[in-house]
Image (tube, coloured by chain):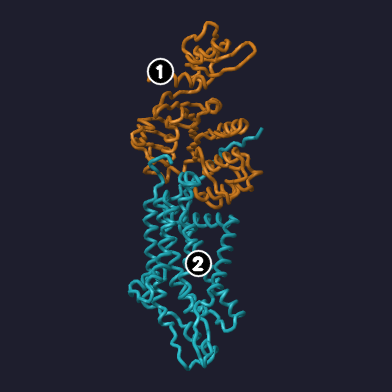
Amino acid sequence: MTTIVHARSDRRITTTQRSYPLLNVLIWELRRFRASRLFWFQALGVFCFLLFLTWALHASEGYDTMSNNVQISAFVAGTSAGGLLRTLPTVLVVLVLFLPFVTADGVRRDLSRRTHELLMTTALPTWAYVWGRYLAGLLMSLGLALLLLASILGMGGLLHLTVADYPLPQTGAVLLLWVGMVFPATILVSSFGFALSTLLPRLSTLVKVVILVAWIVGALVIPRGLGNTTPPAWYVNWDPTSGITALGLLPSYSLHLGPWITSEAQLQQLILTIENKMPDLAGWFAPHLLLAGLSLVLVLVAAFAFKRSRDVLN
Amino acid sequence: MELTIERLSKRYGQQWALHQLSLRLSPGLLGLVGPNGAGKTSLMRMIATLLSPTEGTIYWNGQDIHTHGQAFRQVLGYLPQDFGVYPEFTGRQFLRYLAAMKGLPSSLIHRRVDEVLSIVNLEQEADRKLPTYSGGMKQRIGIAQALLGDPELLIVDEPTAGLDPAERVRFRTLLASLTHNRIILLSTHIIGDVEAVANRLVILREGHVLSDTTPEALLARTAGSVWSVTVDQATAMQLQANYQVSTMVNQMSGITLRIVSATRPHEAAVEVSPSLEEAYLLATSRQAVQV
């Protein structure tokens, strides 16, 4: 028979010494993910896939011209500034496909897993619970976004070493485009997914589907639908998917090929001078960051609207 | 310490799950029993601040728990009827996680987790991943997490459902050891659990308190109302159709029935000592007749 040790301790444990509840939630949530082997496998899988994608898109656009009846060809490097403007919206779609699954269920999964009641009967403040879960999801999403940055710089470096005439990625330009396009998109999608799933836990799957479909339409379908039409400036500046933003920035990376080009090396050199130009930040950079900041308001609404007590049993 | 429930009601649509229920709880173990749908879980969840009452108020030491929720939850330990765990964690990690969520000072978390693991006798299995735990071990982790904050009010909802007999006995003994200077509210439909540990018994039926008594008093009220008789199969069937039969055992000499009835059900029936389960059956059937 099991020996029962009596539970009474001589003095009551006080739980009022809570100093950083938000930090507690955040740290323990990250520890929980760290303890999951599946999480690390998934992160590794995403990184490998992003490396593959960067490699597959390494010659983002080709230029052909004729000189003395000989065809001359050269390519725009996928990891150059000009190349990234062509490929980043597509790669961003791939990243966005993962993000809602990382962040959206931060609170909702406790309901489906039935850990919700254990947590809601603790003295943990509601705001700390919701924001802690959100920030943990956001940090992991930003971790994935950093993997994207690493895959661009890493694969770019590898291609530079192995492919003739492939330029080394310009870290400044890559970072700038990452901060202006990937970083705000990560925050935006994470905030929308988390806030809507927290507000509408029963519709969590629908929330993810709507976000993904909306993003694919915004990043891929609409830019292709526009064809050669010039998009309005406000759309270029405020497009969260960066699909239209890239379209608006690309004309400054266009080449005018003339008869003076007589060799592939000359053409490649010409492309090199253009493709690594720093992108023009005017107009779109601040609105993208502003959109990310505004999406935090939605998380704030979700935190305010979150109820510990329910009106029905389940 | 005192938990006071005043005219508490809960309505789902047009259906009252609880209606104008009032109770006053002081230290000790209160067993809450009743048939399915009696309102036990609704009551437990309202006390645990998980469910909003339609009407009425719950006070902890004179303070409304819904307006002083944060302070109330610091003295609350709750083991739900059905709860989930984080499969990534070991038992020890899970308890440390919940201890941190309960706001235990980090200097105390390791010590307190070791203490509750010892209380529920899970020290040996504490470093195993939670999905490898049996149902009984999971229940013990459940009670361990409820005890982390050394709660003054411990609510346990159907804790022995799904446990094997040895685990049930172990769990009851554990609960009995926790009653000193603490209010324990045990909801169950297994009367044997209450009989073994409760010093007060509340029977709920259709959202009302049918009886608020002690196990001894309920047994005393049932004296003279439980009968044993051995009869042939046809008579047994007839008695079963007309009376509340608590047990029915096939023997060489015939079928032995224990019958709960205010009057002698058969000329050969002899009066026997009631069990608490039979006392409960009589209490609920009386009410049914009144209804």
Q: Distance between the residues labelled 1 and 2?
A: 69 Å
Q: Quadrant of the C terminus of chain B?
A: top left
Chain appearing in cyan on the rendered image? A
> Does any portion of residue A105 appear in the rendered image?
yes
Q: Which chain carries label 2?
A: A
Q: Is mark 1 on a helix, strand or loop?
A: helix
Residue denoted by label 1: B289
Residue A18 screen position, x and y as percent: 48, 52
Q: How crowded is mark 2: few (under 14 residues within 10 Å), some or many (20 or more)?
A: many
Q: Is residue A207 above or below residue B199?
A: below
What is the display colour for chain B?
A: orange
Give the amino acid at mark 2.
Answer: Ala
Q: Which chain carries label 1?
A: B
Residue B151 screen position, x and y as percent: 50, 40
Asked if the residues shown at circle 1 and circle 2 are in contact, with their CB atoms under 8 angstroms apart, the answer is no
**Mark identifier at residue A145:** 2
Q: Is residue B90 above or below residue A147?
A: above
Front-most of A160 and B264? A160
Tell me: A84 left or right of B122: left
